[in-house]
Amino acid sequence: MTDDGGVESKLAEWPGDRVQALIARAAPGDVESAIRRASSGGELSAADLAALLSPAARGSLETMAREAQRLTRRHFGRTITLYAPIYLSNVCAADCLYCGFAAKSGDSHQRLTLDPPGLRVECEALAAQGFQTLLLVTGEAPSVVTVDYLAESVEIAREYFPSVSVEVYSMTQPEYEKLVGRGLEGVTLYMETYDRPCYAKVHPKGRKQDYAARLESLDRAGADGARKLNLWVLLGLFDWRLDGFWLGLHARHLQKQWWRSAVAVSFPRLRHVPARFTIPAPVGDSDLVQLMLGLRLFLPQAGFTLSTRENAGLRDRLIPLGVTHLSAGSSTRPGGYALCGSETLEQFAIEDRRSPSEVARAVAAAGYDPVWKDFDRAFTGF
């Protein structure tokens, strides 16, 4: 571990007005310098990242794409890891305005928390399709989906999958330690947005209102030995250039502080939201491409995850731009694979409805190797 300081203090050095000014001042020459530095193997600065995310970089996207592809192949080869989520529960005490699980979303579909036999049914269904990498997901309901319940769920899932991660509510260090002790490999946790006023506005209820506790969660997971740390912002809540900048700094902090862990970033884009919510800062396809390219040059060794929120055609086209992990055949409702079908409340509607085998064939057709597990226990101790 290195003494890299706290992530909150790191981000405090870069308030929104300072980042906006840096982005606004960026010129094509700054973009070219950042690309050259990435090509030579140098570590990019915060100013470089701002330039790559700026409007001045629009004319250099093809050059950035070539460099992003080269860097990805250098560090990850031509492999794309396939994974799937199992939603343990759609019960939620929070009221995140953009989420289908929200306590006041207005959706009357069934709320369900899987019991151990139900989880086994779902695990068996996914394992039969070839998956070896699993993500367990819940709503924000720690009184229902307790830490003990999550620990038992991880233990059950490990009977079927060698790699198990969770995407759940923010936890304490002893709580993460308990899950790691049961075989947990990774923790995914999203800030939604790093802008505090926007964060407060879209999270009016529940423990998720605690911005600082959520921001520091992945540090706690890293301290407890989680081998994978995955973070993201929810694109569409706030200016993607600012949130992308802060996301890059957060990811680099985790890489330096918890260097034994593999850090990955995801690129979820708001598309289907409850009727009461309007997406405040929509992100176009070209914006998404620029964000991915800029972050790949800034974070050459970070995994890049792209979910089924995006449609099949776009996902296929984005593979060469730095993607290393793809979800496939996903369901965003508890029991959605074998237990309950479409009866339960889903978190969001997916766009890419291809089967896992179809996604694997598309990856192969793009010249990459679909893999179902990206490590061996002999090397990791898991």
Image (spheres, rainbow, N blue to C red):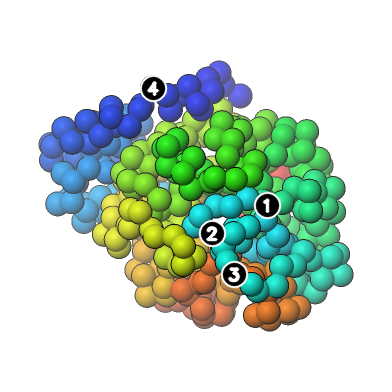
Q: CA distance from mark 1 to mark 3?
A: 14 Å
Which amino acid, by three-letter code, is at mark 3?
Asp
Disc 2/disc 4 C-alpha distance (Å): 31 Å
Q: Residues within 10 Å of mark 1 (few under 14, many from 20)?
A: many
x, y percentage for residue 68? Answer: 33, 51
Quarter-wise, where is residue 227 in the image?
top right
Q: Which residue is mark 3?
A: 107
> Which mark is first along the chain, 4 or 1?
4
Q: Mark 3 and mark 4 in contact (Cβ < 8 Å)? A: no
Give residue 141's position: percent from left, percent from top: 71, 51
Q: Residue at x 58, y 52 (%)?
A: 95
Q: Nearer the viewer, mark 2 or mark 4?
A: 2
Mark drawn on residue 13: 4
Q: Earlier in the sequence, mark 2 or mark 4?
A: 4
Discs 1, 3 touching: Cβ within 8 Å: no
For the residue pair 341 and 151, the one nearer the viewer reads as: 341
Can you tell which mark lies on residue 99? 2
269 versus 380 height, above or below: below
**N-term-proximal mark, 2 vs 1:** 1
Q: Which residue is mark 1?
A: 93
User: Residue 350: x percent and y percent?
Assistant: 51, 72
Q: Earlier in the sequence, mark 3 or mark 2?
A: 2
Report helix, strand or loop for mark 2.
loop
